[in-house]
Image (tube, coloured by chain):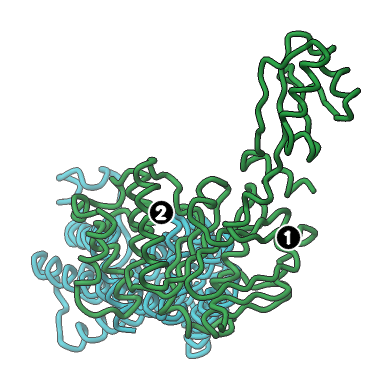
C-alpha cells in the first residue's frame, strides 16, 4: 500500500491539477470575503462600484457564523465539482493516457492501487478544506468580522470539515464512471448530473432523501426553513461513498481491460 | 520440463465475434516464441488473456505454474510485459516513470532504474519528461519497464513498433541475449514476418483467432516451396516444348514460365535440354523459393 500511495502522490505532485483545485478554493474563500465586505457596508460597496447603485445584497450579517456557513456551502456545491475533478483526474487519466495497462499485471494488486487512489483523493480534499479554513480565518480577521468565539470557530470548522468529507464521499461514483467509461468525460458527466439533480431535488423538498443534496442541506444552503438531512441523510452519503469505492475496486479487479 | 506458459482451449467471444478460438499454447523455459498474425488476428487479445487483463470466455491459462484469474498475482513479479503502444505518464521524466514502475514492483534501491536506463540507452533522456520522447524512445521506455525487474518471462506485443532499423536490431540482440544467456522466456507478437523469423525459436501462426500452424524456426525453410522460373525468346514455343517433355509450365504475370513440379526443380538441366532440343533455348533459368510473405499468406489462406 505504501508503494502504491507513493506513486499516486508523485503523480499528483507533478501534475498541474492540485494547483487548479487550490486556486478554485482560494477564489471561493475570496468571494466569501468579498460578500462579507459588501454586507459590512453596502453604501461603501456601491461607492466602490462592487455592486450596482440599485443592488442590495441579502444573505445575512457580516459576521463569523455567516462567513463560516458560506464557506461550508461553498464546500458543498463547489466541492462536488472540485473534488469530482480530483476523482476524474486520479482515475480517468489512467484510461485517457492509456497507462492503466501498466497497472494490471503487477505484484501490487489492482485493489491496492484503487485504494491508494481513494486515500490520495480523501487527503487531497481534506487539504483543500484546511486551505479554505485557513484562508477564511485570515480573510475574516483582515475584515474584522464580529461574532468571534471559540465555540463559533469550532462549530464553523467542524461544519466545513464534515461537509468536505461528505462531499468527497459522494464523488466515489465519479471515480467509478471514469473507470467504466475509460476516460475523463463519463466522470465529468456523472459529476454534472449529480450537481444538477441535487439542486432540483433539494428545491422540490426531498433533499434529505437524495445523497447529493445532503451536504448542501447540512451546510444550510437551502435556508433555515429547510429540513435538516439528519442521520438518515448522512447514512445515505456514507452508503454512496462505500458503494462507490467497492464498485470501483471490483470493476478494476474483474472487468476486461481490452482497450 | 514444466511449461512457462500453458493455455488450453483459450477462447474469447465478444457477442457474436470470436476474437480467440480454442487456442492451445505450450511454451517452455528459454524459448523465444513468436506469435505471428495479421492485424486483428487475435494476437493482442491472446496476450491480454495470458496477462490476466482479459478474462477468457472459456479455457485456462497458467503462467509460471500459477493459474491466471482475477485477483491472482503470484506470477506477476516474474513477468515483464509490453502491450500494444507504450504509455507513460507524460509529466513525469523517464527516470520517474521507471521509479513508479519499480515502486509498484516493490523493488528496493535505485540501481534497478539506473541499470535499465543504461541497458536501453535512455541515459540521455533520463531527465526528460515522457511527453517529449520520440516514438522510438517511448518504445524503449516501455521495454525498460518490462525489463526493470529482470523477469523470467517477457511478454511483448509488437516490440519493434516505432523503432528505427538500428533500434530493431539492438532490441533483437538484447532479447536474444536475455534468452540465451539468462534463460529468459520471451513471447512476442508481430505482424512483421521477417522480424519474428529472425528472432523466434518457434513460431505460432494465428489467424482469425485460431492457431493455424506452429513450427520450429529451423524448419521454416523446409516449408518454403520451390519452383523453376524460365524465360525464352519464343515463350509459346518453349511452353509447347516443355509440355511435350512432360513438364507442366504455367505462364506467370511477369511473362515467364513457372514450373512448380518437383522434377523441374530437381532437374533444371533436363528442362534446359528439352528447350535447346526444341530450338528455343532458355534466356533465363532460375530455381526460386517462396518468400516468407508468400509462405505466410499460403498458411493463413489454407
Residue A25, picture quadrant: bottom left
Residue B274, picture quadrant: top right
Label 2: chain letter:
B
For marks 1 and 2, the one nearer the N-term is 2
| B38 is higher (above) or lower (below) than A81 | above
Name the foreground residue: A215 vs A58: A215
Residue B302 placement, left or right of A144: right
Residue A64 placement, left or right of B188: left
Name the foreground residue: B117 vs B211: B211
Residue B263, given in percent of the width and then of the height, sits at 79, 38
Q: Residue at x 62, y 56 (%)?
A: B219
Which numbered tag is attached to residue B210?
1
Which of discs 1 and 2 lies nearer the camera? The answer is 2
| B70 is higher (above) or lower (below) than B34 | below
Mark 2 lies on a secondary structure that is helix
Give the residue number, with chain letter if any, for mark 2.
B172
Name the foreground residue: B121 vs A153: B121
Mark 1 lies on a secondary structure that is strand
Q: Residue at x 26, y 68 (%)?
A: B99
Residue B121, given in percent of the width and then of the height, sits at 25, 53
| B298 is higher (above) or lower (below) than A116 | above
- Quarter of the image for the N terminus of chain B: give it: bottom right
The chain assigned the colour green in the figure is: B
Residue B257, given in percent of the width and then of the height, sits at 77, 22
Amino acid at each position: 500500500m505504501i508503494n502504491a500511495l507513493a506513486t499516486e502522490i508523485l503523480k499528483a505532485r507533478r501534475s498541474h491539477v492540485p494547483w487548479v483545485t487550490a486556486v478554485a478554493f482560494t477564489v471561493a474563500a475570496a468571494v466569501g470575503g468579498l460578500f462579507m465586505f459588501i454586507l459590512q457596508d453596502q453604501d461603501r460597496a456601491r461607492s466602490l462600484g462592487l455592486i450596482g447603485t440599485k443592488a442590495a445584497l441579502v444573505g445575512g450579517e457580516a459576521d463569523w457564523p455567516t462567513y463560516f456557513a458560506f464557506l461550508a456551502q461553498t464546500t458543498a456545491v463547489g466541492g462536488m465539482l472540485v473534488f469530482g475533478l480530483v476523482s476524474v483526474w486520479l482515475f480517468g487519466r489512467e484510461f485517457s493516457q492509456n497507462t492503466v495497462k501498466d497497472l494490471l499485471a503487477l505484484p501490487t494488486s489492482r485493489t491496492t492501487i484503487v485504494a491508494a487512489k481513494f486515500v490520495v483523493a480523501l487527503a487531497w480534499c481534506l487539504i483543500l478544506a484546511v486551505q479554505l479554513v485557513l484562508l477564511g480565518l485570515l480573510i475574516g480577521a483582515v475584515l474584522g468580522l464580529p461574532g468571534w468565539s471559540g465555540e463559533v470557530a469550532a462549530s464553523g470548522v467542524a461544519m466545513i470539515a464534515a461537509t468536505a468529507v461528505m462531499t468527497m464521499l459522494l464523488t466515489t461514483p465519479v471515480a467509478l464512471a471514469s473507470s467504466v467509461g475509460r476516460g475523463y468525460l463519463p466522470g465529468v458527466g456523472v459529476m454534472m448530473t449529480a450537481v444538477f439533480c441535487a439542486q432540483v431535488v433539494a428545491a422540490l423538498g426531498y433533499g434529505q432523501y437524495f445523497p447529493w443534496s445532503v451536504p448542501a442541506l447540512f451546510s444550510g444552503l437551502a435556508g433555515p426553513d429547510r429540513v435538516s438531512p439528519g442521520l438518515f441523510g448522512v447514512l445515505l452519503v456514507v452508503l454512496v461513498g462505500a458503494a462507490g469505492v467497492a464498485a470501483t475496486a471490483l470493476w478494476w479487479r474483474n472487468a476486461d481491460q481490452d482497450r | 520440463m514444466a511449461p512457462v506458459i500453458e493455455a488450453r482451449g483459450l477462447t474469447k467471444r465478444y457477442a457474436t465475434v470470436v476474437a480467440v478460438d480454442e487456442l492451445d499454447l505450450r511454451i517452455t523455459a528459454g524459448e523465444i516464441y513468436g506469435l505471428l498474425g495479421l492485424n486483428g488476428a487475435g494476437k493482442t487479445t491472446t496476450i491480454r488473456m495470458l496477462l490476466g487483463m482479459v478474462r477468457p470466455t472459456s479455457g485456462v491459462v497458467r503462467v509460471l505454474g500459477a493459474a491466471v484469474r482475477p485477483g491472482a498475482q503470484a506470477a506477476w513479479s516474474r513477468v515483464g510485459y509490453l502491450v500494444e503502444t507504450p504509455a507513460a505518464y507524460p509529466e513525469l521524466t523517464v527516470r520517474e516513470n521507471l521509479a513508479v514502475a519499480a515502486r509498484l514492483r516493490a523493488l528496493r534501491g535505485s540501481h534497478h532504474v539506473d541499470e535499465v536506463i543504461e541497458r536501453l540507452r535512455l541515459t540521455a533522456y533520463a531527465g526528460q519528461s515522457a511527453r517529449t520522447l520520440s516514438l522510438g524512445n517511448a518504445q524503449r521506455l516501455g521495454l525498460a519497464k518490462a525489463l526493470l525487474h529482470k523477469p523470467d518471462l517477457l511478454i511483448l506485443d509488437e516490440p519493434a513498433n516505432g523503432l528505427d532499423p538500428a533500434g530493431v536490431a539492438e532490441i533483437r540482440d538484447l532479447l536474444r541475449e536475455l534468452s540465451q544467456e539468462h534463460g529468459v522466456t520471451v513471447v512476442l507478437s508481430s505482424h512483421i514476418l521477417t522480424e519474428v523469423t529472425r528472432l523466434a525459436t518457434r513460431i505460432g501462426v494465428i489467424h482469425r483467432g485460431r492457431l493455424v500452424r506452429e513450427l520450429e524456426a529451423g524448419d521454416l525453410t523446409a516449408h518454403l516451396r520451390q519452383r523453376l522460373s524460365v524465360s525464352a525468346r519464343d515463350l509459346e514455343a518453349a511452353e509447347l516444348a516443355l509440355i511435350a517433355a512432360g513438364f507442366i509450365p504455367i505462364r506467370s504475370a511477369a511473362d515467364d514460365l513457372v514450373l512448380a513440379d518437383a522434377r523441374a526443380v530437381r532437374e533444371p538441366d533436363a528442362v534446359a535440354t528439352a528447350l535447346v532440343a526444341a530450338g528455343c533455348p532458355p534466356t533465363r533459368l532460375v530455381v526460386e523459393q517462396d518468400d516468407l510473405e508468400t509462405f505466410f499468406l499460403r498458411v493463413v489462406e489454407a
